[in-house]
Image (cartoon, rainbow, N blue to C red):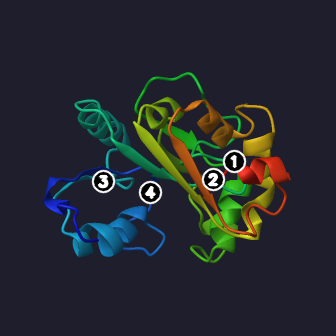
């Protein structure tokens, strides 16, 4: 992208499966390295090594994350309303920058449905995730949510109560969040909500 000095960018990883090697296609580390970090030339990045000493990774990367304010967070909304890997009921209170989470079955089924895994039994049951409170500390949040599979979650998070049962609903409390939807993911929203989303 023209005009961005990628060598000045510092990037933090949002979430990663526990126990999954970076060599496998479903690894978010592999995805980020191949599709963002190497092509853009980002040299200052902090990845979550979910197949290493998980406790040490959570402490180290969390400590590095807290050294400077985050300018922008790029997130999505899961089919179960999750934010990063914060599945319902999400922890809205912890101030820890990264936490170890149990992945619920709808979240794991989403990964199979998207083609990252062959079966539910292949999907790890635990992950490292940036916490909800840490995500909300970003100065700006951009949310990209495509596809009809996300329509019910989008409706719950945008029009339902702000609740740990719809984790991404908490984004409505952030003063500088922009949500990008396509026609399919926004299909269940009222006309009033559609007018307030990008």
Spatial CA span between label 1 and label 3: 34 Å
Q: Is residue 113 above or below residue 188?
A: below
User: Nearest the camera: 121 or 76?
Assistant: 76
Spatial CA span between label 1 and label 2: 17 Å
User: Nearest the camera: 103 or 164?
Assistant: 164
Which x, y percent locates residue 125? Answer: 59, 52
**Residue plotted at (51% across, 23% down):** 94
Q: Element type at marker 4?
A: loop
Residue 196, disc: 1
Q: Residues within 10 Å of mark 1 (few under 14, many from 20)?
A: few
Q: Residues within 10 Å of mark 2 (few under 14, many from 20)?
A: many
Residue 19, disc: 4
Q: Nearer the viewer, mark 4 or mark 3?
A: 3
**78 to the left or right of 31:** right
Q: Element type at marker 1?
A: loop
In the picture of the structure, the residue carrying the numbered disc 2 is 77
Q: Are marks 1 and 2 in contact (CB under 8 Å)?
A: no
Residue 44 visible in the current orientation: yes
Quadrant of the rendering where the C terminus is positioned: bottom right
Q: Element type at marker 2?
A: loop
Which x, y percent locates residue 101? Answer: 55, 40
Residue 47, disc: 3
């Amino acid at each position: 992208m023209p005009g961005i000095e990628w060598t000045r960018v510092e990037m933090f990883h949002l979430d990663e499966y526990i126990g999954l090697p970076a060599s496998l296609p479903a690894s978010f580390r592999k995805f980020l390295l191949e599709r963002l970090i190497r092509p853009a030339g980002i040299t200052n990045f902090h990845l979550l090594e979910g197949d290493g000493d998980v406790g040490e990774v959570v402490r180290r990367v969390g400590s590095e994350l807290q050294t400077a304010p985050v300018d922008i967070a790029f997130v999505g909304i899961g089919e179960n309303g999750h934010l990063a890997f914060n599945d319902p009921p999400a922890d809205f209170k912890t101030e820890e920058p990264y936490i170890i989470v149990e992945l619920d079955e709808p979240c794991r089924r989403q990964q199979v449905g998207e083609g990252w895994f062959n079966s539910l039994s292949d999907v790890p049951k635990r992950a490292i995730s940036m916490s909800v409170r840490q995500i909300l500390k970003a100065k700006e949040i951009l949310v990209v949510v495509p596809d009809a599979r996300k329509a019910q979650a989008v409706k719950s998070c945008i029009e339902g109560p702000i609740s740990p049962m719809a984790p991404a609903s908490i984004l409505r409390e952030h003063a500088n969040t922009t949500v990008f939807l396509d026609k399919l993911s926004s299909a269940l929203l009222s006309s009033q909500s559609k007018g307030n989303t990008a």
